[in-house]
Image (cartoon, rainbow, N blue to C red):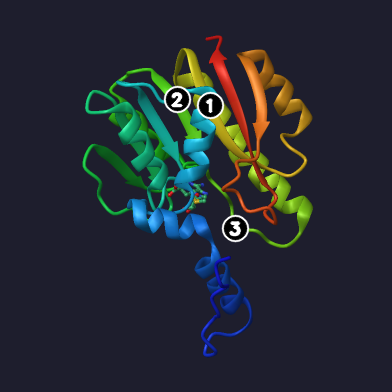
Amino acid sequence: MAKELKTPKKFKSSSQLWLKRQINDPYVAKARKEGYRSRAAYKLLEMDDAIKCLKRGAIVVDLGAAPGSWAQVVLEKVGLKGMVIGIDLLPIAPMAGAEFIEGDFTEDKPLQQLEKLLYGKKVDVVLSDMAANTTGHNQTDHLRIMNLCSLAFEFSKDHLKEGGSFICKVFAGGTESQLLSEIKKSFSSVKHIKPSASRKESAEIYLVAKGFKG
Ligand SMILES: C[S@@+](CC[C@H](N)C(=O)[O-])C[C@H]1O[C@@H](n2cnc3c(N)ncnc32)[C@H](O)[C@@H]1O
C-alpha cells in the first residue's frame, strides 16, 4: 500500500490541511501527470462519460472557467472545429483554441462580451462550475449558489440549440425545487451526479440536463 505523505511542519492549520489533502490526493497527481490545470478535469470527464454531450465540432460555454481544466477537456473532445468560450472573475492563462473573458457573469458587460464572441451562434453545451465564496452560513451559501445556477439556466434557455445540454454545479440538497421543476420542463432528462473526483467531504453535486426542448 502507498505510504501516506507527511505535510511539511512549517505549514499550519487550514493551509496544512489543504496541503496534506493535495499531496495525498490521487486526482491531483493524475492531473499533474496528464497536464490538466486542475483535478476538476476528472469531474467533467466522468459526467461526459455518463451523458456524452461533448461531441466533435460542438460550441461550448464554460461559466466559472478558471484555471481552465474543463476548457482543456472540452477542447480535447470538440476538436478543431468546435469552440469553447469561458468566463471567470479570475484571469485565465491563454489556451490555444479557447476564448476567455475576465469578468463577472452576473453583470451585463461581461455577459455582452460573451454573447458577442458567439456571433449569434447557438450553443451545444453550457457548463457552469461557478461557486460563490462560502460565508459559512448555510442558507446564504445555498441562496448564492442557487442564484448562480438560476442565471446559468436563464443563459442556457436563451442560447442553447434544441437538443443541447446543461451541466451546473449545485450543492447538497440538490437544486431548489421550483428551479428544478422549471429545468425539468426545458430538458428531456435531468439528473444529479456526484462525480467520484468530487471530494466526499464537499457538498458539491452537479445538475446534468440533456435534450433542451427549445
Ligand atoms: C471550481 S472553480 C472552476 C474550475 C474550472 N471548472 C476548471 O476546471 O478549471 C469555480 C470558479 O467560478 C468562478 N466564479 C464564481 N462566481 C463567478 C461569477 N459570478 N462570474 C464568473 N466566474 C465566477 C470563480 O472565480 C472560480 O474560478
| Front one among 37 and 212 | 37
Do the residues under discs 2 and 3 have CB atoms within 8 angstroms? Answer: no
Mark toward the start of the polypeptide (3 vs 1): 3
The answer to whether mark 3 is within 8 Å of ligand 1 is yes
> Is 50 situated above or below 163?
below
Q: Which residue is mark 3?
A: 133
Of helix, strand and loop, which one carries label 2? strand
Q: Is residue 57 above or below residue 66?
A: above
Q: Nearer the viewer, residue 6 or 180?
A: 6
Image coordinates of residue 60 in percent, x first then y, are 38, 29
182 vs 134: above or below: above
Task: Please name the amino acid that badge 1 sits on.
Answer: Phe
Q: Report how far apart the C-alphas of labels 3 and 1 lie in the structure.
A: 22 Å
In the rendered image, residue 95, in percent from the top left (x then y), is placed at: 25, 46
Vertical comparison of 52 with 27: above or below: above
| SS type, badge 3 | loop
Give me the C-alpha separation between circle 2 and circle 3. 25 Å
Is residue 115 visible from the viewing direction of this image? yes
Residue 199: percent from the left, percent from the top? Answer: 63, 53
Q: Name the residue type under label 2.
A: Val
Instruction: Locate the N terminus by quadrant.
Output: bottom right
Report which residue position mark 2 lands on.
Answer: 125
Q: Is residue 64 visible?
A: no
- For disc 1, the marked residue is 166
Q: Residues within 10 Å of mark 3 (few under 14, many from 20)?
A: few
> What kind of residue is marked 3?
Asn
User: Which is more foreground, mark 2 or mark 3?
Assistant: 2
- For the residue labelled by badge 1, is the local secondary structure a helix, a strand or a loop? strand
Q: Which-is-in-front pick, marks 3 and 1?
A: 1
* Picture residue at 29% right of the left edge, 29% below the top: 83
Whichever of callouts 1 and 2 sits on the residue coming sooner in the sequence is 2
| Label 2: how many Cα within 10 Å (few below 14, some 14–19, many 20+) | many
